Amino acid sequence: MANEIKITQDDRYAAGIFFYSALPLLRVIVESEPKFAAKFKGKSFVFQVSAACEGEPGGKMATHFVIEDGVFTVKVGKAHESPDLEFAFPDLRKFAIFFSGKGMPFPKIKGMSKLGYLIPILMTLLRMAALLQATDAPKKESDKELLVKLYFYLLPNGISRLNKMGHPEIKNFTQTSPDRAFAWSVKDKPELNSYIRVKAGNSKAGRGVYKRCKPFLTMNFDNAQHALDILMSKADMIEYIKKGFLFIDGAPEFGAALGNLMMTVAYYAQGQYIEG
Amino acid sequence: MAGGLSFTAVESTKLATAEIYGKTLSALGDENPNVVALTADLAGSTKIGDFKEKHPDRFFNVGIAEQNMYGVAAGMAKCGLIPFASSFSVFASLRALDQVHTDICYQNVNVKIIGTHGGTSFGQAGSTHHAIEDFAVVRGLVNMTLICPADGIETALAVRAAANTPGPFYIRINRGFDNTVYSTSDYGFQVGKAVTMNEGNDVTIIACGSCVYQSMQAAKILENDYNISARVLNMHTIKPLDKEAVLKAVDETRRVVTAEDHTIIGGLGSAVAETIVESGKGCAFKRLGIPDKFSAIGLHEDLLAMHEIDAAGIVKNVLELMKADFEAEAVKKGLDITKLNFGTAEDWTDEV
Amino acid sequence: MPLTKKEWVELENKAADLRDLCLQTVIWAGSGHVGGSMSSADILTLLYYKHANFDPKKPEDPDRDRIVVSKGHIGVILAPLFAQLGLVEHEQLKTFNLTGSKLGIHLDCNKVRGLDSSTGSLGHGSALALGMALAARVKGQKYKTFLILGDGECDEGSVWEAAMATAHFKATDLITIVDRNHCMIDGNTEDVMRLEPFEDKWKAFGFETIVVDGHNMNQLSDAIEKAKKAKDKPVCIIADTVKGCGISFAAGNYKWHYGAFDAAKEQTAREDLKKYRAERIARAEKEGI
C-alpha cells in the first residue's frame, strides 16, 4: 500500500455497524427470498467476513455465518478459527469503503475455489448491495417490503452497536433514558416491525412487535413505499406527517431525537464520514 | 433519512387531543346557540381557533385577565348561556379561585371550566405554569364536578357530558400531545364511573389523565415480565369519585396504587385513600405522584419518569408494594423470604 | 328629564322608608353595615322604583334589566328593599343574620328571588355584570345591566380588569354607578389607598363619566337616563355620597361602616332620619318642576 491510512474512531464505528447490523441481513435475505434459500439448500459451511484491526481479539473484527443444511446462524463480532470461505479486508477503512459502496477495494478471498459456497454467497451479497445501495426504490411490492425490512432491522442494531461502542451522541441518549422502547413499523405489516429498547445506558435491538408493552414511540408508515421515501432521503418527514404517510405514535420531540439517531447510523452506513 | 423534526413544526400540523377538543367545542357551538367560548389570551395555546372562526359572535377573549374571565362566564351563565372558559389549569384553579368558588360554585351556575396544560405537561415552562395542586383545590369546591380525561377521545366525551349536565364542571387536560388510550368512543363513558382498562386481581392501579396510558403499559410489563396481574382503573372523574369501584378493588385485589400527574397531597390518591380508610377494610396502598416538591423543567415524558409515574416507575412501585405486602404475609406464615424473587435479569443482547 | 315635584317627592318618601326599614333591620339583627347601606339608598330607590325595567311580580323574566349590587355587604338594606317590593316577607326581616335565616349580611341569590347575584367578595360584581350584558348581546336581548360598586371596592384589580373589558367590548348597556362615600373600614379612602384622581381613572379606562351628588334624586336620575342612552362608550356615574347619611353621628364617619345602636343611639337615629326625610322632601318640593 502506498499510503498508510490511519484508522480513525469513525472507521471503527462504521465497521461496527457493518459487522453487527449490516452483515447479519444476509440471513434475512436468504430467509425472505426462496430463490436465494434454494441456492444454499443442502449446503453446510462457515462463511466469514473480517477486517484486520489492532486491538481486537485475533487481530481482526469479524462476523461469521454458520450454514447448516442451508440454515443460517449469524455470529456477530466473532471470528471462526477456520472458516470455509472468508472475505478478509486488510483494514477497517477498506472494509467500510467497500460495504458502504464508496469504492471497490476487494478483499482477499480465502476458499475461492469452493465455488459451491462462493457463488451463492456472492449472489446474496450482490442482492443485498443492490437493495441497500440503490438510489431508487425497487419496483416490485415484495422487493419494497424486503428493503424496508432490511432498513428496519439495520437501524436498531446500528444504534445499539454504536451505543455499546460508546459513541458519544448515542451514549448520551441512552445514559439518561428511562426504560423505553422505540419502534419502526408499516401499517398492517407486523412482519416488518423492529424496535430498540434503551434504559440507563443499555440498549437492545429487536425484531418483530415489541411484546413487553406498547413502545414509548413508534414511527409508523402507512405503506412500504412511503417508508422507503423517508429512509432513502427522498422526502421530508414533516411533509409526510402532514400528509398522513408517517405517523409518530409518541411525543414529537422524541420522534425528532429518534430521527437524529437514524441519521447517525446513515452517516456511517452510507460512508458519509469518508472524505473524497 | 431526510428532514428533521422540531416540536413547533409538528405542532402546527395539529396534535391529537387539542384538535379533538377544539372540534368538539365547535360542534357543540353548531348544535347549541347558547354555547359560548371564553379565553384569556390563550386561544392559540388551547386550540379553540375553530370555534372562533365559526362563531365569532360567541367567542370572547378577555385578554390576560383570568379572574375577569371566570366572573364574566358566571354572569353569562346566569343569563342562560353555557360558557366554556379555558385557561391553563394553574391559573383556573389558583389565580381565579375566588371567582370559581364564589361566582361559579356558590351561585351554582352552568360554567364549564377547561383547565389546560395540567400537571407537568407544560414541562419546559416550569412551576409557574405547572398545575400540580389543581385537583386538591378544585376537589374541595362544593357543586363542582372534576374530570381528568385520559386522552383526546375521552376529552371530547367529557366536554359533551359537561355541556349536557347542568352545573359547574372542571375538566383538566394536558398541553396537547397525549398518548392515545381509546380507539373508539363507545366504551360507555359516564361521569362518575371509573373505566376498567385492564382486568387483574393481584393489585389495582387507579389512575387519571396521562397516567392511565402509563398504567396500562405498566400492567403489560407486570404481566409479561413478572406474572403479576394488575387491574387498571381509569378514574377520570375525581369528583364525584367512583367509590364503588375503589371498594371493589380493595375487596378483590387488596392492593391499591394510585397514579396522577399531581402532588400526592389532596388529589386522586387522597380521594381514594379517604374512601379506603373510611371503609375500615385493610389494604396495602401507595400514592404515586409528585412528592410535594416543585418539579424540574423538562419534557413531559421525562418528568413523568422522574416522578415515577411513567410505566417503568409504576412497575417499580407496584413491585415494591407487592414485595412488602408479600413479605409481611410470608413472615406471618413463617415462609423463608430469601427464596422470593421479584426481579428478572435483563438481557441486552441485540437480536440478529 | 328633570323630575316633577310629584315624582320627586314620591321617590324621596320611598328612599326615606327604605332607610327607616334598614335602620329597623339593623336593630333587629343587633348590628349591621349601616354606613354603606345608607349611602346607597337613593341609588337603589331610583333603580328599583324608576329606571330599571324590573317587575317584582315577575322576578325571573328573562328580559328584565339586571342589577348587580357588587358591594354585596349592604344586604341589610337590600333585604328591606326586597321586602318593600314583596319579594321577601316583612316577618323574615326579623330573622336577619340569625342562624339558618335566608337573609344575612351578604344575600344569597339562590335564597332571595329577584336578586341577580350573590355578591360579597368585593370586586366580583363588575365581571358578573359584564357577563350579563354580553349575554344579552349574544341572545339578541335588549335589557340593561346596572352595576353598583363601592369606592373602596375599586382597590380590587378585578374591578379594573372588568372595566377594561367593558370598554373594549363596548358594553354600553352596562351602566356602572359608584357609591363614592369616601370611606372604608380602616379610614377614609384617600388615607387608606388613594383613589384620586378617581374620575380620571374611569376616563382612562374608556368610560364616559358623570359626577353627581348621590343624594340629589334629580341629578342622579338625570345621569342614569343619560347613561341608558350611551352608544359609544360605557358610562360610569360617580355618585358623591355620604356614608351613613341621614344619621347625625354616622354621617361621613368611616367608623360607622358597621355598627350597633344602643337605646339612646336608636332614639337619636330615628329622630335624625325623620328630620332628614323632611329636609329632602322640602328640597324636592322646592326644586322639582
Image (spheres, grey):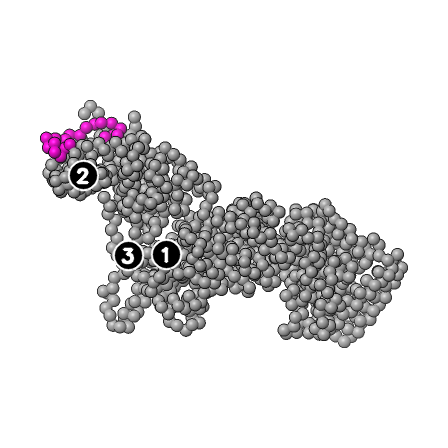
Hey, which quadrant is residue C186 in on the image? Answer: bottom right
| Alpha-carbon span between mark 2 and mark 1 | 42 Å
**Residue drawn at (29%, 34%) of the image:** A140
**Residue drawn at (53%, 57%) of the image:** B162
- Circles 1 and 3: CB distance less than 8 Å? no
Q: Which chain's residue wears label 1?
A: B
Provide the secondary structure element on which disc 1 rests: helix
The spot of residue C72 in percent (x, y) is: 67, 62
* Residue at numbered disc 3: B225
**Residue drawn at (73%, 68%) of the image:** C86
Q: Which of marks 2 and 3 is in front?
A: 2
**Quarter of the image that includes the C terminus of chain C:** bottom right
Q: Residues within 10 Å of mark 1 (few under 14, many from 20)?
A: many
Q: Residues within 10 Å of mark 3 (few under 14, many from 20)?
A: some
Provide the secondary structure element on which disc 3 rests: helix
The spot of residue C162 in percent (x, y) is: 65, 52
Magenta span has B114? Answer: no
| Alpha-carbon span between mark 1 and mark 3 | 14 Å
Horizontally, is A58 left or right of B343 in the view?
Answer: left
Q: Which chain's residue wears label 3?
A: B
The spot of residue A269 in percent (x, y) is: 28, 35
Q: Residues within 10 Å of mark 2 (few under 14, many from 20)?
A: some
Magenta segment: A96-119
The disc label shown at residue B216, or none: 1
* Residue at numbered disc 2: A37
Kind of residue sitting beneath label 3: Asp
Hey, which quadrant is residue B352 in on the image? Answer: top left
